[in-house]
Image: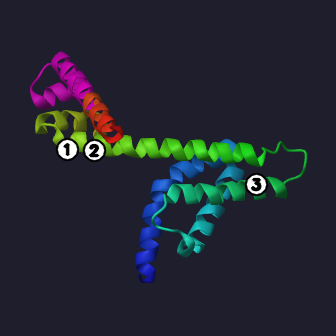
């Protein structure tokens, strides 16, 4: 794999893992700017050590393992008057976030599959509401319907999506 491919693969993994890493760091480090600095150091270290990453394991778990070490290093470098979390607590927090990310990614995949199954009219209503952020009145004007019927249709589409997602997730665990 050439350098550009490695960089592209790292970027893909980092973009997916960054919300979990940031959540972990911001929950562990008190100051906003300190937390931002720690996240940046983690990203730099992950990029530098990307050759060590084993692709058959979840990237987010590896990233959180490094994040935990960087948070511990951050607290060790601070004066002793600050509160320091135990290594065990930081490990539990990283494990919890990793589990939540896995669940969210499965839900996201199920949502994307369910959105693909929607009829075009239903998908258009969702796009108008959530992508273009249109009000029910604006959507009604655009679709030639009443505001009330747009709200009812949106409610039905959301209900159908929830059922579809739950069905897909249940099939995964069965």
**What x and y, as percent, mark residue 42?**
63, 61
User: Is residue 102 shown in magenta?
Assistant: no
Find the magenta span and give its range.
133-161
Mark 2 vs mark 1, CA separation in Å: 6 Å
Q: Is residue 81 above or below residue 41?
A: above
Q: Quadrant of the N terminus?
A: bottom left
**Where residue 112 is drawn, which disc sits there?**
2
**Where residue 116 is drawn, which disc sits there?**
1
Which residue is outermost to the bottom? 2
Say which residue label 3 marks.
72
Contact? badges 2 and 3 (CB < 8 Å)? no
Q: Which residue is more in the foreground, 81 or 53? A: 53
Q: Secondary structure at mark 2?
A: helix
User: Is residue 144 shown in magenta?
Assistant: yes
Q: Secondary structure at mark 3?
A: helix
Q: Is residue 5 above or below residue 174?
A: below
**What x and y, as percent, mark residue 54?**
51, 68
Examine the rendering and report whether any part of residue 30 can be seen: no
Residue at image point 32% right, 37% down:
174
Q: Main secondary structure of the magenta part?
A: helix
Mark 2 vs mark 3, CA separation in Å: 37 Å
As drawn, is 124 to the left or to the right of 30?
Answer: left
Q: Earlier in the sequence, mark 2 or mark 3?
A: 3
Q: Which residue is more in the foreground, 33 or 80? A: 80
């Amino acid at each position: 794999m050439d350098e550009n491919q490695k960089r592209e693969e790292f970027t893909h993994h980092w973009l997916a893992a960054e919300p979990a890493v940031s959540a972990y760091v911001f929950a562990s480090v008190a100051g906003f700017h300190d937390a931002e600095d720690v996240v940046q150091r983690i990203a730099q270290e992950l990029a530098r050590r990307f050759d060590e990453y084993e692709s058959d394991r979840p990237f987010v778990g590896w990233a959180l393992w490094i994040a935990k070490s960087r948070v511990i290093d951050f607290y060790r470098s601070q004066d002793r008057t600050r509160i320091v979390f135990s290594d065990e607590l930081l490990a539990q927090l990283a494990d919890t976030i990793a589990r939540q990310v896995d669940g969210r990614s499965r839900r996201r995949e199920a949502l994307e599959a369910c959105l693909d199954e929607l009829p075009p009219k239903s998908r258009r209503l969702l796009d108008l509401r959530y992508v273009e952020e249109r009000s029910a009145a604006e959507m009604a004007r655009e679709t030639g319907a009443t505001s009330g019927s747009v709200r009812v249709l949106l409610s039905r589409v959301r209900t159908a999506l929830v059922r579809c997602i739950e069905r897909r997730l249940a099939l995964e665990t069965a």
